[in-house]
Image: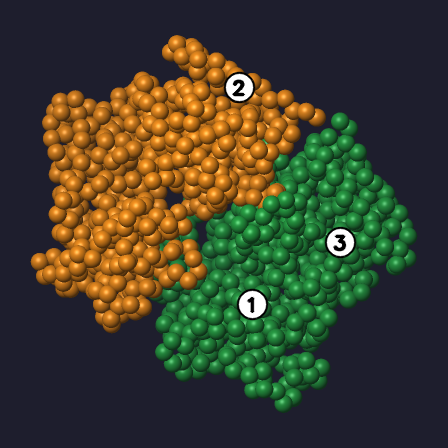
Chain colours: A orange, B green
């Protein structure tokens, strides 16, 4: 991996930082965050501005360029990659290390007195602006919005913003019409006494209108905003996508509708001026609801006294609780996904010993099997196909430089998933195609115990997911082991594979309580640097639990695994399991056999079916 | 319980709220918080201003009096008590219920435009002032400091502020001299580049100078502040306590010391003017370190730009990590405490069947046995002695009106503790003096499983206590049960029985990581309204754990019980325990027998010793 040479680019950027054509006054520093205008986790190529200016293309990082310096803040996952991809113009700021200054503190230490620090107000979230601006101001500097993105002014071959056709989801997939979603949203707005709601997250726009897109890889979303009033609906979207008669029909654009359900379609770029007009026309007590992560530009469009900001929007929360149609879709998607993985693992078992299967070949084969399934759309994230030491790199993605041959001597970790029209999958299995060592089995079994502890946990209604995180670690902790990532994240329904507002992590305290219908992942792991990685991940559905008693009538919840892929019994040290854990594995495998077996049979995949039956033989505990 | 008649008092208060002698401008509302000027949990009678004005004397509550209204905010523990103790002049604001307004919102809804809301700036913590002031200001009102406490102006028979003699603790108790504590504090100050540290919490002053007092019931503290500079030490304390030659000797007041260890003694009431003088004399970059819970008055004495505020002070953190002398003292104190409880339970076993022992008699007897032990000072909190339905009232304290007879038909819960010169104890045992029902045993056993899950937990260094909370609940959750309080709190060393900065609770996310040497309680419970309460509480010491592996060289921690009082085996359904849990109980009882048995023997308490031996017979699990 050669670093990107950025000397010329930085020179150009420093020129536009002083060019009155772009900035009202020269800025002494310019911040280039990772995100897009919707604070998306996955972004389109045209939004990869930080990668363009620095060469560093990891998923998280913020660049700051001053007249003298260029510095990049990123976290532990990316220290090595960033160091490889950036040239000597850049200083790497290792976040999480004790001596690393925050961006604000660093700016204060390097800037001349009374400096202006510029940033694109559409890219920086309002809460971050607030924090940063406060520190800079107290040190005598100013954070200023620069309307034109300065990277775009020097990025001559910047790709076009994607504008792909839309996919309509009918009631059989969504369970609720977009009209009913609007009605429910307005009732939440009425409850909080707000008159307007601004939809800024791409998956929230997609969910609200029962539409999907493909503007961003892995995430079936499209570039759009929406502003919902008590009597109006404005959708900000570009291109001729609204010319498609099917889309017009879906949104009833040409029907004679009650005025409060009539969608006004407006250009994507007009959101700011429209919102400013809304802001200017507000009567006292008319509030506008925005996510506190919405961009500074949109937040500022509403006068402060009129803003109603929450960490999670009502759409985010409604979207997380899947209805019966969505749940059924997720079940179907996971059965199809399991069929593909049974095929894959059966194939790997035969091919790996020949020494011809690399990590990339295995990942491609997984995609091939998935693409044979009905309603397959695309992958839900870049496949993590890793063997031996690569498995210990938690966010690994095989590239030609690192591509390793699978063998009968190493543990193989596959974390992969897909978007089907009926649901989103995300599954990790850790396999050995030869004979695992006692130590590998021991570690695998602790991880499995943690996985089961979460999956089988019973907990009261109203419990937040972070309270379950330690269950996943307890068996590892007992032996002095641990893993340095969270245990689970929310999963969308044919939407983003990572979604809020719930999760299972020692870090998230702002999560919303788990509710029946929510879907999260359960994915503890163990990683031994330089040797191997182990992770066992199922997507699980929150369901009501039957309990002997019912304290304060609160009711209880538990999880039902949606993922139905065998957990390799060869890797399990059965004598480390309790009888209850052993029964859990056997019950789970019985269900895989029945449900996925029937589908393999139906699809005539007899060899994979034989593999499934072999892999789901009950464990027997020797007392 | 008759309510306090407050009509006349409220009339008087409303007059002084307009009296130019006390207020610069009339205030339309006056806030009376619970606390004292040190934000203490337990307060002296002279600080019980909220109880004086309202009649409600629970431990938590805030009164607000306007020209038309008088309202009291308190939490679920006190809804009933507050309703009983307050007359019709008062509106009870039930905190935690959905429809209850916050104090700020309520003020905004009832006040005429442009009102002034008064509060004693010494009683309100700075962080609370900030929050409240912001909301009021945005609604056009003003929060104003009223120097003279308005309750004090009408409280004609207000008790004197206590000023009791001091107790000196020598090195054999404290392990570290006050000089060395000052040196360590100054090195923390240098690390953070602050020049001054203001000690506002009473237990922090006591700990720093290795002094104790008895100004507040149950907490061996005395009214004082301290201001530590890099070269100066100022102690603000009243009375002739500094005339005591032993105190002068302890603090070396008359020695020729290096100037930086010379303590300047000043009147308690001069803290504000002295701090204002410090604030006025600061050079640029000279910061002053305060707790963010320090009073508004003291915080305001330091210009904003010079303040360095943290949720936990370096003293709070240093105090929490007990050294070898303190740990040994705590061990001794817990052995003596166990001797007293063995005596008590042996006595109860004989007396309860006679039908003559009430909750109050049992509590008094517990105090009597404790007071026979060496270095006993006082109780560490009001004894919770509760039988049958009273046990379900979590913060119950027997009073003549509720005093219930102990019997062989009801569960008895005793939560009690003492201050010894060598340590602080806090222990809860739940006993049955007849034959417990299968259901009572079942619930008790789930609570015990939770207690063991925490006590035996192994977790990495750096883990925060709140991550262990769910371990205590898991067995209860499995059956649909739970308890509505945290699992543990920090415990002082001959200091406050509740102390920060660590704890075990689903609520505390601001806790500091657990460290070897910290001491916390482990006290899960189960409460059945109207029937019984169960709680099993030990005080436990955080110690290093030996583990098979050592991930990232982080090291592991676990707990060692300091409390050594038998857990009633009669209440245990042995078949609900795993073998591991059964072994834990047997090992624990073996230790009680050895350690406490030896002390009972030494003290010649042979009957109690026989009781101990009987109560520590090993459990046998029927497979």
Question: Decide: marks 3, 2 in contact (CB < 8 A)?
Answer: no
Who's the residue at 27% across and 55% down the image? A87
Which numbered circle lies on residue B315? 1
Front residue of B364/A11: it is: A11
- SS at mark 2 in the image: loop
Which quarter of the picture shows residue A166? top left
From the viewer's side, name the closer residue of B444 and A585.
Answer: A585
Tell me, yes or no, whether the two marked residues, 1 and 2, touch with CB atoms within 8 Å: no
Judge if badges 1 and 2 mark residues of a common chain: no
Identify the mark at residue A466; answer none if there is no mark. none
Disc 2 sits on a residue from what chain? Answer: A
- Neighbour tally class for label 1: few under 14, some 14-19, many 20 plus, Cα within 10 Å: many
Q: Position of residue B103 (x, y in %)?
A: 42, 55
Residue B493, percent from left and from top: 67, 63
Q: Quickly name the residue at label 3.
A: B363
Between tags 3 and 2, which lies in front? Answer: 2
Measured from the top left, where is residue B527 in percent x and y? Answer: 64, 40
Numbered badge on residue A616? 2
Mark 3 nearby-residue class (10 Å; few <14, some 14–19, many ≥20): many
Residue, x 48% and y 49% (percent of image)? B95
Q: Secondary structure at mark 3?
A: helix
Name which residue lies at 12% across and 38% down: A267
Tell me residue A490's x, y (percent): 40, 35
Tally of marks? 3
Mark 3 or mark 1, which is nearer the start of the sequence? 1
Quarter of the image where one finds residue A231: top left
Q: Nearer the viewer, mark 1 or mark 2?
A: 2
Residue A301 shown left or right of residue B191 in the figure: left
């Amino acid at each position: 991996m050669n670093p990107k040479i950025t000397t010329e680019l930085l020179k150009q950027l420093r020129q536009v930082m002083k060019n009155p054509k772009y900035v009202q006054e020269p800025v002494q520093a310019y911040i280039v965050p990772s995100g897009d205008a919707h604070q998306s986790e996955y972004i389109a190529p045209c939004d990869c501005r930080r990668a363009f200016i620095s060469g560093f293309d990891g998923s998280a990082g913020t660049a700051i360029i001053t007249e003298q310096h260029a510095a990049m803040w990123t976290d532990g996952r990316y220290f090595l990659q960033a160091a490889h991809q950036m040239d000597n113009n850049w200083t790497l700021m290792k976040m999480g290390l004790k001596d690393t200054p925050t961006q604000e503190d660093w700016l204060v230490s390097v800037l001349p007195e009374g400096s202006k620090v510029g940033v694109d107000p559409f890219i920086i979230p309002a809460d971050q602006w607030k924090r940063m601006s406060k520190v800079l101001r107290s040190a005598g500097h100013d954070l200023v919005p620069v309307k034109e993105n300065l990277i775009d002014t020097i990025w001559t071959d910047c790709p076009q913003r994607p504008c792909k056709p839309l996919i309509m989801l009918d009631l059989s997939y969504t369970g609720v019409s977009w009209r009913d979603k609007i009605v429910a949203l307005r009732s939440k707005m009425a409850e909080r006494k707000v008159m307007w709601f601004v939809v800024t997250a791409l998956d929230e726009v997609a969910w609200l209108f029962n539409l999907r897109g493909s503007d961003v890889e892995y995430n079936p979303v499209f570039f759009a905003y929406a502003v919902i009033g008590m009597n109006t609906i404005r959708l900000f979207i570009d291109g001729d996508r609204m010319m498609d008669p099917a889309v017009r029909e879906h949104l009833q654009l040409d029907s004679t509708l009650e005025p409060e359900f009539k969608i006004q379609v407006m250009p994507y770029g007009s959101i700011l001026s429209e919102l400013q007009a809304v802001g200017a026309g507000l009567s006292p007590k008319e509030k506008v609801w925005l996510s506190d992560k919405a961009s500074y530009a949109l937040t500022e469009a509403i006068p402060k006294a009129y803003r109603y900001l929450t960490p999670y929007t009502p759409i985010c929360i409604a979207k997380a609780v899947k209805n019966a149609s969505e749940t059924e879709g997720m079940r179907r998607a996971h059965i199809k996904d399991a069929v593909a993985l049974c095929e894959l693992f059966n194939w790997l078992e035969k091919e790996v010993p020949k020494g011809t299967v690399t990590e990339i070949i295995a990942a491609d084969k997984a995609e091939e099997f998935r693409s044979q399934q009905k309603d397959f759309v695309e992958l839900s994230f870049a496949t993590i196909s890793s063997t031996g030491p690569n498995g210990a790199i938690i966010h690994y993605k095989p590239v030609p430089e690192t591509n390793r041959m699978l063998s009968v001597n190493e543990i193989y970790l596959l974390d992969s998933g897909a978007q089907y029209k009926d649901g989103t999958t995300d599954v990790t299995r850790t396999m050995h195609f030869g004979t695992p060592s006692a130590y590998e089995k021991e570690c695998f079994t602790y991880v499995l115990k943690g996985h089961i502890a979460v999956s089988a946990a019973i907990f009261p209604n109203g419990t937040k997911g972070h309270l379950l995180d330690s269950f996943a670690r307890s068996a590892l902790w007992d032996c002095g082991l641990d893993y340095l990532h969270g245990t689970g994240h929310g999963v969308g329904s044919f939407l983003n594979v990572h979604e809020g507002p719930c999760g299972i992590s020692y870090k998230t305290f702002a999560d919303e309580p788990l509710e029946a219908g929510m879907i999260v992942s359960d994915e503890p792991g163990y990683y031994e640097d330089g040797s191997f990685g182990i992770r066992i991940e199922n997507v699980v559905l929150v369901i009501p639990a039957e309990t002997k008693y019912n304290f304060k009538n609160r009711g209880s919840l538990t999880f039902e695994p949606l993922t139905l892929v065998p957990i390799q019994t060869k890797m399990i040290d059965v004598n480390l399991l309790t009888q209850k854990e052993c029964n859990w594995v056997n019950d789970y495998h019985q269900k895989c056999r029945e449900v996925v077996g029937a589908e393999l049979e139906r699809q005539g995949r007899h060899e994979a079916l034989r593999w499934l039956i072999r892999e789901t033989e009950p464990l027997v505990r020797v007392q």
